[in-house]
């Protein structure tokens, strides 16, 4: 019994690392392909078939480069920031069920864990901005903090109706609760706001204020080079993967689907959300910070609150 | 309140229109031409370095080594030496050298040529590690010569 659980833990660690690495390699390539074709270009074509190995080549280049510490940087914080950004994903992906049998670890409060660890991304950004001793980095970090206040409350208010309907904090329980009908059908408003909120959560355009390369050089990771930079990059794409997985579990019925095996359905749903986020990124220009705050507080918050209250009222009556 | 909802509606509508634009772009063929596997078409009036026209019947150049291109050239980049081949009535070039590093592609040599022997080539892939080959471009290369071996020594 004990040996089996150790083996299982080892397999989980290896599986999660491989999944996150492969996902980043694939999604970065996909993003560049989508970006290219949306601008009448081709994207990467040279390295590997259809340019598939381009990300591997870029990764090797980044790994072989020197990490430069600015002389005035707060070194421990500066060095810790990319790790703080990336590591929570590895933990948060554990309770995510990819199929009926494929899950790192079943947790009764899996959803809470994911939400809590999702916040650490912003902490990493704040540490990067503060530790760099660079005005652009600090501005980017402060924007990330302003942003988290604007999206996190609507995000949670969109998750609450799902929790109320399913009566469970466990991701597996939520998936099983929407066996015949997906919650996207019961909760279209929450679903819609949730998609907007996860683009904000993953710092993606049109809400990529923390990075904002046309205004802030590269925002919070201006001073990062080599592997430290690629960790931020990896973290961004891993958070996208995680957020998409949670979105498909909360609203699109997780691994449920006809004909194909559960894992395939789950991955299809995840990559549907990833493609949607790419589509947004290469269509919408970045909004201003005040516009984003107005949008978060004056539009997302009232609508998600209203949706939450109506759901609670209807549930109380029925 | 009415204004607020209207603003949201209009905003959403514009977002959908934007998404439609990028999606149609994505589904149309990209305009990229993958050099060097394929090349873009060269415009008809493209000016490459000058070259000598070939007389299709004989394979010789049409040049009569009169030197009007040398005189017309504002940058002094053409050198022509001519001689009469045995038994011929007209002169033919022994040497026709272009210093392409000085040439500004003005085309005065092309216009001034009385026998229409000079034209612009369509060769644009002209990168090299040194300027030497471009300073002494031999435009007679690739053309048949009316001279025997001994006259090639110049």
Image: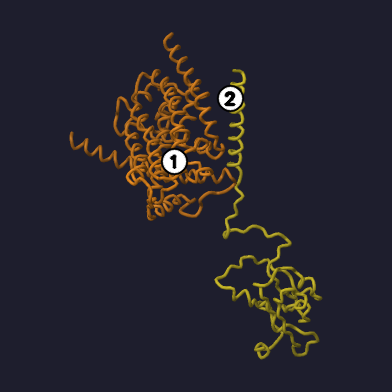
Chain colours: A orange, B yellow
Compared with A55, A267 (above or below) is above
Label 1: state its secondary structure.
helix
Compared with B68, A153 (above or below) is above
| Mark closer to the observer (2, 1) | 1
Residue B88 drawn at (x, y percent): 78, 87
Q: Quadrant of residue B84?
A: bottom right
Numbered badge on residue A138: 1
* Residues tagged by mark 2 and mark 1 found on one chain of the structure: no
Residue A54 drawn at (x, y percent): 45, 51
Please give the name of the residue rendered at 29% of the width and 40% of the height, measured from the top-left corner.
A13
Q: Quadrant of residue B79?
A: bottom right
Is A121 situated left or right of B62 in this image?
A: left
Is B28 situated left or right of B108 in this image?
A: left
Q: Quadrant of the N terminus of chain B?
A: top right
Numbered badge on residue B30: none
Residue A245 drawn at (x, y percent): 41, 33
Query: How far apart, in angstroms, are the residues tagged by discs 2 and 1?
Result: 32 Å
Outermost residue on the front side: it is A72
Q: Chain of mark 1?
A: A
Q: Which residue is mark 2?
A: B8
Residue A250 drawn at (x, y percent): 41, 26
Q: Quadrant of the C terminus of chain B?
A: bottom right
Label 2: state its secondary structure.
helix
Q: Residues within 10 Å of mark 2 (few under 14, many from 20)?
A: few
Q: Chain of mark 2?
A: B
Is B68 situated left or right of A86 in this image?
A: right
Compared with B41, B101 (above or below) is below
């Amino acid at each position: 019994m004990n040996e089996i659980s150790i083996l299982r833990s080892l397999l989980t660690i290896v599986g999660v690392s491989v999944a996150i690495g492969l996902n980043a390699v694939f999604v970065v390539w996909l993003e560049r392909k989508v970006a290219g074709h949306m601008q009448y270009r081709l994207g990467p074509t040279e390295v590997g078939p259809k340019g598939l190995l381009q990300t591997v080549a870029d990764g090797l280049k980044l790994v072989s480069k020197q990490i430069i510490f600015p002389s005035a940087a707060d070194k421990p914080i500066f060095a810790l920031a990319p790790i703080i950004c990336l590591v929570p994903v590895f933990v948060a992906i554990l309770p995510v069920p990819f199929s009926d049998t494929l899950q790192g670890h079943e947790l009764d409060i899996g959803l809470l864990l994911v939400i809590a660890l999702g916040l650490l991304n912003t902490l990493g950004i704040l540490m990067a901005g503060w530790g760099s001793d660079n005005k652009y980095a600090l501005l980017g970090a402060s924007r990330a903090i302003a942003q988290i206040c604007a999206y996190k409350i609507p995000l949670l208010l969109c998750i609450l109706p799902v929790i109320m309907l399913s009566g469970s904090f466990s991701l597996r329980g939520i998936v099983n609760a929407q066996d015949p009908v997906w919650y996207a059908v019961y909760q279209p408003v929450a679903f819609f706001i949730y998609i907007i909120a996860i683009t904000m959560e993953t710092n993606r355009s049109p809400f990529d204020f923390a990075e904002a390369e046309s205004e802030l050089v590269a925002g919070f990771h201006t001073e990062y080079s080599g592997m430290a930079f690629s960790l931020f990059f990896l973290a961004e794409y891993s958070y996208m993967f995680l957020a998409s997985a949670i979105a498909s579990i909360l609203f699109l019925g997780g691994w449920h689907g006809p004909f194909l095996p559960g894992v395939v359905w789950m991955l299809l749903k995840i990559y549907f959300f990833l493609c949607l986020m790419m589509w947004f990124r290469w269509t919408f220009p970045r909004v201003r910070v005040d516009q984003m705050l107005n949008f978060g507080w004056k539009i997302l918050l009232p609508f998600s609150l209203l949706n939450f209250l109506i759901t609670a009222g209807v549930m109380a009556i029925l | 309140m009415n204004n607020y909802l209207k603003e949201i509606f209009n905003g959403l509508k514009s977002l959908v229109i934007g998404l439609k634009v990028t999606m149609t772009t994505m589904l149309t063929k990209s305009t990229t031409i993958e050099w060097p596997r394929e090349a873009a078409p060269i415009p008809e009036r493209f000016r490459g370095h000058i070259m000598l026209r070939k007389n299709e019947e004989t394979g010789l150049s049409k040049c009569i080594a009169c030197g009007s291109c040398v005189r017309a050239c504002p940058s002094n980049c053409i050198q022509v030496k001519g001689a009469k081949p045995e038994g011929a009535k007209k002169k033919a070039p022994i040497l026709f050298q272009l210093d392409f590093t000085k040439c500004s592609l003005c085309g005065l040599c092309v216009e001034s040529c009385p026998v229409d022997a000079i034209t612009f080539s369509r060769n644009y892939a002209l990168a090299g590690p040194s300027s030497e080959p471009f300073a002494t471009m031999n435009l007679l290369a690739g053309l048949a010569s009316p001279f025997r071996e001994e006259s090639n020594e110049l």
